[in-house]
Amino acid sequence: MFWNSKKEETAAPESGQAPAAKETRAFKAEIGEMLDLVINSLYSKKEIFLRELVSNASDAIDKAKYLALTDKSIAADNPEWRIDIIADKDKKTLTVSDNGMGMSAADMEQNLGTIASSGTKAFAEALKKDGGKNLPELIGQFGVGFYAAFMVADSVSVVSRKRDGSDAAEWTSTGKGEYSIGPAKKESYGTEITLHLREDQLEYTGQWRIENLIRSYSDFIAYPIRFGEKGEKPKDDAKPLNTMKALWRRSKSEVKPEEYAEFYKHFTHDYDEPAKTIHFSGEGAVEFKALVFIPKKAGMEIYMPQTKRGLSLYVRNVFIGDDFEMLLPEWLRFVKGVVDSSDLPLNVSREMLQDDATIRKIKQAVTGKILSTLEEMASKTPGDYEKFFSEFGRILKEGARSDWENSDRIKKLLLFPSAKSGPGKTISLADYVKAMPSSQNEIYYLAADRIEDARSAPQIEAALKHGCDVLFFTDPVDEWLLESLRDFEGKKLVNAAASDTVFGGIAEREAEKKSIEEAAAELKPFVEAVRERLKDSVKDVKISSRLTDSPCCLVSEPDAISPSMARIMRAMKQEVPEQKRILELNPSHPLVKKLAGLDGAERDDLVELLYGTALVAEGSPVPDAGKFAKQVAALMLK
Ligand code: ADP
């Protein structure tokens, strides 16, 4: 049902008419190369070609059905929509025919001869690299299913008549370098693809073989697929090979995992299996069935809230349309699937549904079910959940902020790297709170561009000394999330690098305060000298208890924009007010002690260098990097 995506966007050549006589043309280089790879592939499951052709036929019927409703120029003779598979043992051919939208000569040129998709070249490269081991996945991934026919056929002919008044046309090719397009005779609308099977692939003329293939790959196709032998079209009343039973209307125990996976692949054009399949019925107020999938990999929708989203809607098994965005909150735009309800009238329009109470209830139920599935995944299979989160975490953060109805549940699903969780590991807010020492009352976080910077940031030394963990906000959206994530389970989220943040219990703090006051009194002249020297760069200089191993660090006013956020804002061409920060010094560090004992130019140079290291330590750029490097070099020579 994705026929209206990708390729249609590239304009077809102007003329819809077939050339008066047959013309032979060369494939675009990358298609030729790809076909060589497909033809010579040693891939053993060549049978998938049939699934691809049937899927294309089904898409073409979807398209015709849909367009006939909205576009008067499309011939809608209201046929029984059908797909026929016709074998001819004598002629060694297998034909897949549909009465869908059809293709004009220009469409054939566009879809089968030139760049069938911008991904064709990438496909050829991936296939070469892979050596053909994962051919079907690659075929699906790059949307070049049609060419799979060349795995079993040494020549393919496509005869088609489009439902828009174009002349019928024929496309033929042996898959070796060239194809021909010419006029053809075809009475009925639609497409007929004939495969001249290779000698070693004649098994695909056998009814039993075809029946099995259709049952395992294409059972859910919504149109009857019938089989005809000896080159004859199957009779209208022949029993279809597929049950056409919409998966979502079947009971869960009846559906095999492979069937879900096949349906998902057909439905989404994803080459991979879904990460999660959620099949359930609405209970209570609204009767509906839903079959929704969470993909393994995130697509561009993560970054594009305006992207097409939502679920396909059926009413009592009748397809109403794709992308009903009112069935899911915006942040769930990565979820794909189907909702089928008996509680809606058949003649619904999108506009009618916008404010419909039934739709709202379905949306609530589907969203709740997806959330509970994620919650279960997080608690029962944390490894899988982490994988999911690394793909879709960003969109969950968006949900935590934008979906006020569900934000409490979404917040619990968030994961962050932290100082105490090892490399590559993450922690939830609930687990963070659970692990807090009894003296800790707040949740600490540190914003940084990169986890490595955060891990070695001097600003968190004191937190670690007091046994507190620090969450790392390394995703640009994390800080923006803070607007709605002010607290969690009654604990405030606090910037570990803010000037007023103190760590540890009351008694410890008192003792620390006292020793800091003493140190500050002792180092007063030095602090004043540093303040004077760096007056253009920092707002203030203070003695602090924040540091253990590092001589100094920079902290911000509690509500200041963090340096990493400021960089993002600048990158987005937003104005960022200049904010000077506070330089904190570690009174017990030997370097601070040493500098306090110096004076004059020698001290001033080193103070400047010290400030530079504070910037470097948190991953911020040094204003005059060249000068800084020279100073360091000079120091190394001493
Ligand atoms: P995909 O199906 O992933 O788009 P294919 O290589 O299988 O890629 O098909 C290329 C294109 O050729 C399709 O997108 C469609 O436009 C056209 N096509 C293929 N089969 C048919 C058919 N039976 N009827 C109409 N158009 C078809």
Image (cartoon, grey):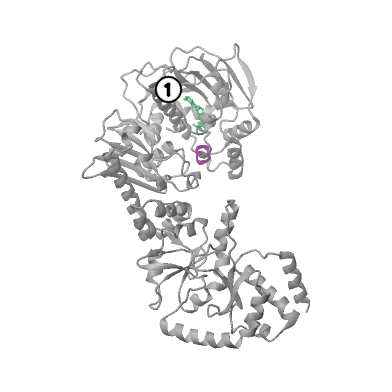
The spot of residue 566 in percent (x, y) is 57, 59
Could one spot residue 250 in this view of the protein? no
Q: Residue at coordinates 54% horizontally, 29% vertically from top-left?
A: 150
Q: Position of residue 363 (x, y in %)?
A: 32, 44
> What residue is shown at x 64% (from left), y 76% (from top)?
531
Judging depth in this view, the residue of 301 and 388 nearest the camera is 301
Q: Is mark 1 within 8 Å of ligand 1?
A: yes
* Left or right: residue 590 compared with residue 307: right
Expressed as whole percent of the image width and height from the top left, the position of residue 376 reads 34, 56
Residue 349 sits in which quadrant?
top left
Q: Main secondary structure of the magenta part?
A: helix
How many residues crowd mark 1 within 10 Å: few (<14), some (14–19), many (20+)?
Answer: many
Location of mark 1 (residue): 100
- Residue 185 in sight here: yes
Location of the N terminus by quadrant is top left
Taking depth in this image into account, of 272 and 241 the one nearest to the observer is: 272
Extent of the magenta region: 136-140
Q: Residue drawn 45% across and 74% down?
A: 468
Single out the residue that lies furthest toward the left: 284
Taking the magenta stretch, the answer to whether it contains residue 39 is: no
| Quarter of the picture holding the C terminus | bottom right
Seen from the viewer's position, the closer of residues 133 and 199 is 133
Looking at the image, residue 557 sits to the left or right of residue 237; the answer is right
Q: Is residue 625 above or below residue 155?
A: below
Q: Is residue 475 above or below residue 128?
A: below
Amino acid type of the residue that numbered disc 1 sits on in the rendered structure: Gly
